[in-house]
Image (cartoon, rainbow, N blue to C red):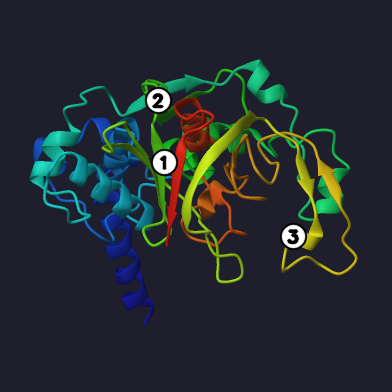
Amino acid sequence: MRALLFVVMLAASSVYAAEPALSAADTLSAAQRAQPVVPKSRGPQVLRAQVLLDRAHFSPGEMDAAYGGNMRQAIRGFQKLRQLTVSGTIDAATWRELERDQAPVLDVYIITAKDVAGPYQPVPADMAGKAKLPALGYASLAEALGERFHCSPELLRRLNPGKHLNQVGEHLLVPNVAIIKPLPKAASVLVDAKEGTLTLLDAGGMPFAQFPASTGSKHDPLPEGRWTVLGVATNPEYRYNPKLFWDAKAGETKARIAPGPNNPVGLAWIELSIDHYGIHGTPEPGKIGKTQSHGCIRLTNWDVMQVVRAVGRGAAVLLQA
């Protein structure tokens, strides 16, 4: 039995050793880079695809080097735009289009003293606790770096084994997303609850950017119809009113929540022409497209900031289930 266990452990370690590290995303062989990306795919090839999709403005959400629902929708949107077979998987034709972007997918970031200094503070789960804080900043440097580079803190750790994410001067491998180009102005916005996406369209109705979104629940369904953008606020404070939430806890009262990335609406609020509804960021990027919202349209903080720069007052917003 012990011998069998040893053989199993040896086999598992051999498989792990044979799997390229995530840091190989820029050094994969031509054969490795040509492999299709399909459900259950993981590793440096998937990370490569996620970065290229993000830079093409078809966001996979929080990058994690694993094929998931948000990545599938990003691939489908990119394929539609490039008039490819819409499969939700990356085949040879889709790789050719993605790799028109030839910049490295990884970059080196050096942690600064300002990064380490923060300030950082744990964020209470309840609204009353949040209301006591003067700002809703990041809880840790790992969280801050994850948002800066559009990925989970766990991905940063996997990219940088043995390195410290809170040490001044540490050189970290990170997704190369700083070179993402600004979006042009959008004439309209399409939010599709079934697809779990928010898409920006030009004056001719052609899509040019897509982001994963959480879009409501059975208790607070997305208000279907055509609305308009009334205004845009960045780094907003949040006014909590328990009467507007079906799941509010007994005894909760109205509260003012200070601005910050861990504010309940994140780094931006795009007000729509229907009371209490808007497009906004979130303090939990890993849950976008995977959990329900209270009716509003949630994006990651980095995605909502791209949308904020692309939409203005009066832009049309079509919400469909």
Gap between marks 2 and 3 measured at Cα:
33 Å
Q: Residue at x 59, y 35 (%)?
A: 230
Residue 144, picture quadrant = top right
Q: Amino acid at mark 2?
A: Lys
The reply to whether the C-beta atoms of the residues labelled 2 and 1 are less than 8 Å apart is: no
Q: Which mark is residue 71?
A: none
The quadrant the C terminus occupies is bottom left
Gap between marks 2 and 1 measured at Cα:
11 Å
Count the labels in the image: 3
Using the rendered image of the protein, determine whether residue 161 is visible from the camera's viewpoint: no
Tell which of 82 and 96 is nearer to you.
Answer: 82
Disc 2 marks which residue? 185
Using the rendered image of the protein, determine whether residue 302 is visible from the camera's viewpoint: yes
Is disc 2 placed on a helix, strand or loop?
loop
Q: Residue at x 47, y 21 (%)?
A: 109
Where is residue 154 shown, x and y percent of the image?
50, 46
Tell which of 202 and 48 is nearer to you.
Answer: 202
Disc 3 marks which residue? 244
Q: Which mark is residue 189?
A: 1
Gap between marks 1 and 3 measured at Cα:
25 Å
Is disc 3 placed on a helix, strand or loop?
helix
Q: Amino acid at mark 1?
A: Val
Q: Amino acid at mark 3?
A: Leu
